[in-house]
Image (cartoon, grey):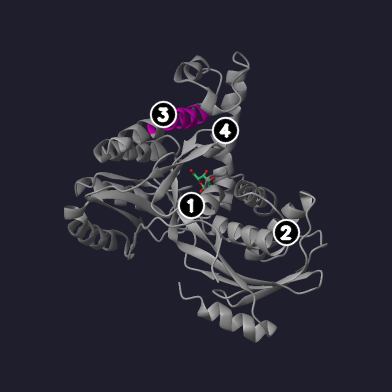
Amino acid sequence: MDTSKIKEKFRSLYGSDGVMYTSPGRINIIGEHTDYNGGFVLPGAIDKAMYCEIKPNGTGKVRAFALDLNESCEFGLEEADKPEKQWACYIFGMCREIAKKGKSVQGFDTVFAGDVPLGAGMSSSAALESCFGYALNDRFSLGFTRMEIALMGQATEHNYVGIKCGIMDQFASCHGKEGYLMKLDCRSLEFEYVPFNPKGYRVVLLNTCVEHNLAAGGEYNKRRASCERVVAEIAKTHPEVKLLRDASMDMLKAVKDKVNPVDYLRAEFVIGEVQRLLDACAAMEKGDYETVGRKMYETHEGLSRQYTVSCPELDYLNAMAKGCGVTGSRVMGGGFGGCTINIVKEELYDAFLQETLAAYKNEYGIDARVYDVVIKDGARKID
Ligand code: GLA
């Protein structure tokens, strides 16, 4: 992204220059809704990111300007109430979470902007939290690790946005590495970098351009509550089970009559998804993307029918992909709109996009957006 507009605005608002930081959005190959269940995820940071320029201002106040929205907000670091504007809550939340850890942030001026599409399932909000977390950590020499910054981003979602999300998005934004995916164990927070070079294939996102808002209706939080209720039931006979990751299909079957059918289906999806990720990783190690792709279709099916976080537009794009012979396709991220992620053989790429975009437009009157996936580095300073 061209960051010169951020610099110009910063100078015109505050009369001097600050330091620029960036943190990216993410994709996830497989392992959806597994993070808050202690399972695995397989994300990678992408070439779409949030950017902020910041400079300490010697006061107890934060003055922020959201360039893409042309909106400003000011809040005191000692204020108890969160700002009204949602975008400002992300910055406010990060400052508060840092303070809770006993470190102090002083007042600062900032201008930020980005090119992570909003509501597309690419984690624009995690990118914003991680961008400010990383920037404040560096500017004020706070000494947090990347994982600690990611955890404070997650806490910001929980405490100031109201989404009880897992750690995947903030983790990926903070730890991304060019050319690599990351296999994260969300129970232990151990992770490894996995080279990602699917020779002969392209990875492409198709945005339904149907916006999701994970907070609206609390649908995301409801999924999490279902999982927790099932864990509580299983733990009555298996106290070692603290998360769905710890449970087997047999344990789940044994409580079938004790949990409600909706919760049961959701838990069945999660336990299956933890295993699917492991199978997909094993296949990927051998360069077997056909198996990875099959697992992705299975994930889509589960997210649509069992976990019920898809929507007609996403199901349509998924079915089109299947019809066009695409290797793997599924809804990506939290769901309820946003993108499908597709692994497609190079020779099918053009025909797939041409056919799908035309059919989608015909069906819904919407131009779906296309993003070729490029795996890039995580949070960093960029001056
Ligand atoms: C959202 C959340 C993540 C994760 C995904 C689903 O992106 O922020 O923590 O739960 O949904 O895998």
* Residue placed under numbered mark 4 in the picture: 187
Q: Which of marks 1 and 2 precedes in the sequence? A: 2
Give the residue type that dot 4 points to: Arg
Find the distance from the CA under tag 2 to the CA under tag 1: 23 Å
**Mark 2: few, some, or many residues within 10 Å (few <14, many ≥20)?**
many
Per the rendered image, the range of residues in magenta is 262-276
Indicate whether residue 100 is drawn in magenta.
Answer: no
In the rendered view, tell whether residue 77 sits above or below residue 192. below
Q: Is residue 355 left or right of residue 2?
A: left
* Residue placed under numbered mark 1 in the picture: 176
Find the distance from the CA under tag 4 to the CA under tag 2: 26 Å
Indicate whether residue 264 is drawn in magenta.
Answer: yes
Find the distance from the CA under tag 3 to the CA under tag 1: 24 Å
- Residue for point 19% across, 60% down: 350
The local secondary structure at tag 3 comes to helix
Question: Is there a contact, CB below 8 Å, between mark 4 and mark 2?
Answer: no
Question: Is there a contact, CB below 8 Å, between mark 2 and mark 1?
Answer: no
- Residue for point 32% across, 36% down: 285
Q: Which of marks 2 and 3 precedes in the sequence? A: 2
The local secondary structure at tag 1 comes to loop
Give the residue type that dot 3 points to: Gln
In the rendered image, residue 88, in percent from the top left (x then y), is placed at 66, 65
The local secondary structure at tag 2 comes to helix
